[in-house]
Image (cartoon, grey):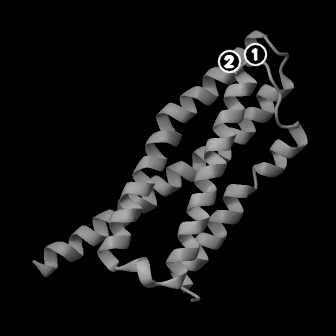
Amino acid sequence: MQEFLSMTYYWLKAGHIIFMIFWMAGLFILPRQMVYMHASTAGSDEEALWAERTQTLSKVILIPSIVLVWVLGLALAFTIGAWTQGWFHAKLLLVLLLSGYHGWMSASAKKMARGERPIPEKRLRMLNEVPAIVAILTVILVIVKPF
């Protein structure tokens, strides 16, 4: 039984990392697509094309990935009893913030698809760095476990 549980842990961990990579890739692509949509004329064919691309990105990569990251991550947390560990609380906070960022950016992309420009282009370029910063901090927390 112990061997089965340890193998389950590795499969959960592998899945969590795989879908975290997909989610992060999508979060890197989304603001870049929004920059291109921002530069297009509202109501143009080009804007419609970028709107379709952001919608496809969301449906095919972002939504399935975030769901699987959360499900597999919570399963891992229960498996290893992470709820009492400080590094896990910090990681959970970062993942909650990144999930909020994901939702906000997706909502902004939908507004842009309707011709609105809720976020200036320069800010979109800066927001593209948010996933990288969160990824760096999360990896340090999980690998080093500083507290």
The amino acid sitting under disc 2 is Leu
Type of residue at label 1? Answer: Glu
- Residue 129 lies, with reference to residue 123, above or below; the image says below
Which numbered marker is on residue 3? none
Query: Which residue, given by chain and number where applicable, does mark 1 sit on?
Result: 46
Residue at screen point 50% across, 76% down: 88
In the rendered image, which quarter is residue 69 located in?
Answer: bottom left
* Residue 26 horizontal/vertical position (percent): 59, 44
Mark 2 nearby-residue class (10 Å; few <14, some 14–19, many ≥20): some
Say above or below: 101 vs 61: below
As helix, strand or loop, the secondary structure at mark 2 comes to helix
Q: Is residue 12 left or right of residue 141?
A: left
Which class describes the residues within 10 Å of circle 1: few (<14), some (14-19), or many (20+)? some
* Quarter of the image with the N terminus in it: bottom left
Which residue ends up furthest to the bottom in the rendered image?
A: 147
The image position of residue 24, as x and y in percent, is 58, 52
Q: Nearer the viewer, residue 114 or 126?
A: 114
Q: Secondary structure at mark 1?
A: helix
Q: On the rendered structure, is 123 left or right of 129?
A: right
Residue drawn 56% across and 61% down? 95
Residue 73 in picture, x, y percent from top left: 41, 63
Could you say which quadrant of the image residue 113 lies in? Answer: top right
Q: For mark 2, what is the residue?
A: 49
Q: Position of residue 57 (x, y in %)?
A: 56, 33
Residue 114 figure quarter? top right
* For the residues bearing labels 1 and 2, Cβ distance under 8 angstroms: yes
Cα distance between the residues tagged 1 and 2:
5 Å
Rendered-image quadrant of the C terminus: bottom right
